[in-house]
């Protein structure tokens, strides 16, 4: 009998997916329209359009921008759309919604292009504890893509994973 320590994790066929490695690189900007509202709540079309016309949109070049309103105002859809028309030529991606909506859309695009064929019939662990803002929806999308092909799916780290699915 050998007293040699064997690293069973290193020798296993277990494959790890780290969503943090798939995180799209680029600056995120939350564009709040509240400052362009009268008293932060009332949209006056003439004033709003003037503010949109005078804003330096080039500063968002290659950024990922989410357009939202931080106040509890009822804003017509055209107002968000007008801003989107100004951002689209400059920003790498423009979405109407929160930062989480932006991250979800970015991850949807990344996961739709991801080739998962190497995970067929293998145990997979989805790494947890990300330092970047991975939206919960990204984990759900990944599960729906992995479950039909993986032998098993776990979450966490190899030394302390939570089983989620086993075929």
Image (spheres, grey):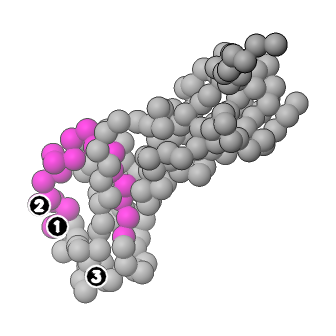
The residue at 15%/46% (across/down) is: 58
Instruction: Give the CA separation, mark 3 to mark 2.
Output: 19 Å
Q: Which residue is mark 2?
A: 54
Q: Which mark is residue 51?
A: 1
Dot 1 alpha-carbon crowd within 10 angstroms: few under 14, some 14 to 19, many 20 or more: some
Of the pair 114 and 52, the residue shown nearer to us = 114
Secondary structure of the residue carrying tag 2 is helix
Of circles 3 and 1, which is in front? 3
Which residues are drawn in magenta? 50-69
Q: CA distance from mark 3 to mark 1?
A: 14 Å
> Which secondary structure lies at badge 1?
helix
Residue 85 seen: no
Q: Tell which circle, 3 or 1, labels the residue nearer the N-terminal end.
A: 3
Residue 62 part of the magenta-drawn span = yes
> Residue at 69% of width from left, 16% of height from top?
4
Q: Do residues under tags 1 and 2 come within 8 Å of each other at their CB atoms?
A: yes
Q: Earlier in the sequence, mark 3 or mark 2?
A: 3
Return the x and y of residue 118 as percentages of the image width and height: 66, 16
Is-magenta flag for residue 22?
no
Judging by the rendered image, the residue that carries numbered circle 3 is 40
């Amino acid at each position: 009998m050998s007293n040699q320590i064997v690293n069973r994790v290193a020798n296993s066929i277990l494959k790890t997916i780290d969503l943090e490695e798939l995180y799209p690189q680029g600056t995120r900007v939350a564009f709040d329209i509240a400052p362009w509202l009268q008293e932060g709540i009332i949209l006056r079309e003439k004033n709003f359009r003037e503010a949109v016309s005078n804003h330096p949109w080039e500063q968002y070049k290659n950024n990922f921008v989410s357009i939202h309103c931080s106040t509890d105002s009822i804003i017509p859809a055209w107002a968000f759309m007008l801003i989107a028309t100004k951002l689209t030529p400059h920003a790498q991606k423009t979405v109407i919604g929160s930062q989480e909506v932006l991250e979800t859309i970015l991850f949807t695009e990344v996961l739709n292009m991801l080739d998962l064929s190497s995970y067929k019939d293998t145990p997979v662990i989805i790494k947890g504890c990300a330092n970047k803002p991975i939206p919960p929806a990204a984990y759900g999308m990944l599960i729906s893509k992995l479950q039909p092909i993986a032998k098993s799916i776990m979450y966490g780290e190899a030394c302390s994973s939570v089983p989620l699915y086993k075929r």
